[in-house]
Amino acid sequence: MLRSYLRLVLFAVGLLLGVQVPGLINDYAHRVEAHLMEAQQSLRGFQDSADKFFNGDLQALVAHYRESTDPVFQNDGQSVSALITRHQALDAEWMALQGPWWVRDWHVISAADPQISQETLNGYTYQVLLVPEAIGWGVAVAFILALVLECLIMLPAWTLYGVRKYKGEVPEHWR
């Protein structure tokens, strides 16, 4: 009987861990969006200059800064180039998060921006979202956790005591 309760507790813990995944991914998406908006705001003045003098081409503005003999302008060209690169990376990250939930989840699990991921983990507060995606993650994680731990616990027992043959009667602990 105790073993059955332990299985239920293990399943419940897995369920609670699994329902955290969509909340974490949602927080990650919000952080990416916030960083993207900040990058757009940082580039706004430079984009205005590029619009006025270079037909909107930021790369031409950067090239103009780099070709200058003034070291301050050369340094600013590097800074603007870094801002453009960061904006492009955040824009690509944002676009990757716009697909279906399974594509978005896989992207965050396998190819998320490490800096934003760490920020998300550091600022994450536990939450339970009652959406189908969270329920699916919860049940899947609970099942996998229960299965893995059950196998890890039962494998030594099977190895030491052998697998009992079914004799047509139901064992006492199954009733």
Image: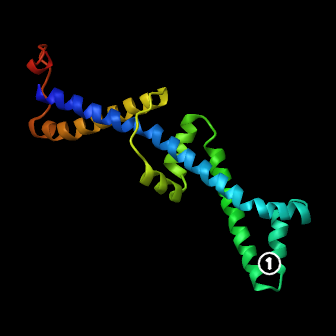
- Name the residue tied to disc 1: 66
- 51 to the left or right of 110: right
Residue 30 x/y as whole percent: 56, 45
Please report the residue visible at 37 percent of the width from the left and 35 percent of the height from the top: 141
Residue 27 x/y as whole percent: 51, 44
Mark 1 surroundings within 10 Å by alpha-carbon count, few (fewer than 14), some (14 through 19), many (20 or more): some
Q: Is 6 situated above or below 35?
A: above
Please report the residue visible at 22 percent of the width from the left and 41 percent of the height from the top: 152
Q: Quadrant of residue 137?
A: top left
- 75 to the left or right of 9: right
Residue 84 x/y as whole percent: 72, 63
Q: Secondary structure at mark 1?
A: helix
- 139 to the left or right of 88: left
Q: Is 95 situated above or below 170?
A: below
Q: Is 134 situated above or below 43?
A: above
User: The C terminus is located in which quarter?
Assistant: top left
Amino acid of disc 1: Arg
Residue 77 x/y as whole percent: 76, 74
- Work out whether residue 37 or residue 81 is closer to the camera in this orientation and state it: 37
Q: Is 142 situated above or below 109?
A: above
Q: Quadrant of residue 49?
A: bottom right
Q: Quadrant of residue 7?
A: top left
User: The N terminus is located in which quarter?
Assistant: top left
Please report the residue visible at 72 percent of the width from the left and 74 percent of the height from the top: 78
Q: Is residue 54 visible?
A: no
